[in-house]
Image: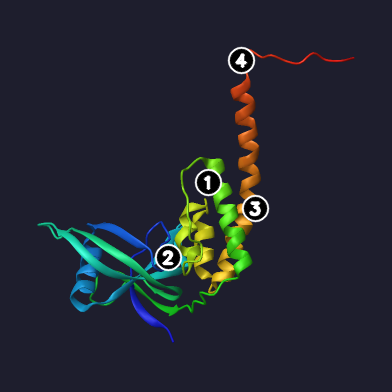
Amino acid sequence: MPKFLPLFPLQLVVYPGEKLKLHIFEPRYKQLLSECRDDQATFGLPAYLEGKLAEYGTEMRLINIFKTYEDGEMDVLTEGVCAFHLEHFQRVVPEKMYSGGDVTILENDSEAYAVTTEELAYQYARFHELLRSGYTRDNFHAKNISFQIAHEVGLTIQQKVHMLSLQREAERQIMLIDHLHAIIPVLEGAEDTRKRIKANGHFKTLPPLEF
């Protein structure tokens, strides 16, 4: 059954379990976060892309207010609770400055296939090896690992929204593997090109050719 949430759209995707720091300065969102603090309420964070709200977002809870300024601005820490589908957007909530919407909370099946998780770990390591990013992960069996690494594999914001819509961890892992299978050959080609360029201009000792 749909539930109503005040909405705080941003040009990013936050996943369940992910923490997000925000500096709150707009009057409407100062009001929203103050109410979350006073009423122990949650709010919705749908992604804003291509001039409109995405169909999917994340229910968020306020964890901590680090600082409140004299003008009411705040530095806060929030955390994703669960994914939702936005059923109806309400641009103006009566007697409020912020927008809201009716949302349906999505179920989340956190079970994954061992073989899929193993493949994801391998492709993740190869991806970051080619990028020379220094990113490493030892534990790919953590619950909902897909949400933990979604920002670390080069997904577009549209892909991130799509992953938020998937209600099974197994499906999310397969999506990430398909994405890595597509992008890694491009990186491998770039690595080969980098090696060829690096070799250019150096003194070379070449073996004689036999004709």
Q: Position of residue 53 (x, y in %)?
A: 44, 64
Q: Name the secondary structure under disc 1.
A: helix
Name the residue beneath numbered marker 4: 201
Q: Name the secondary structure under disc 4.
A: loop
Residue 50 seen in the current view: no
The kind of residue tagged 2 is Tyr
The kind of residue tagged 3 is His
Indicate which disc, 3 or 2, sits on the residue closer to the N terminus: 2
Name the residue beneath numbered marker 2: 15
Name the residue beneath numbered marker 3: 181
Which residue is drawn at the image coordinates 61% and 35% (left, top)?
Answer: 191
How far apart are the alpha carbons under marks 1 and 4? 29 Å
Name the residue beneath numbered marker 1: 128
Which residue is drawn at the image coordinates 52% and 54% (left, top)?
Answer: 155
Indicate which disc, 1 or 4, sits on the residue closer to the N terminus: 1
Q: Residues within 10 Å of mark 4 (few under 14, many from 20)?
A: few
Which residue is drawn at the image coordinates 25% and 68% (left, top)?
Answer: 63
Please indicate whether residue 144 sits to the left or right of residue 45 in the image: right
Q: Name the secondary structure under disc 3.
A: helix
The kind of residue tagged 1 is His
How far apart are the alpha carbons under marks 2 and 1? 21 Å
Q: Nearer the viewer, residue 34 or 109?
A: 109
Q: Name the secondary structure under disc 2.
A: loop
Farthest residue, direction left:
70
Q: Quadrant of the C terminus?
A: top right
How far apart are the alpha carbons under marks 3 and 4? 34 Å
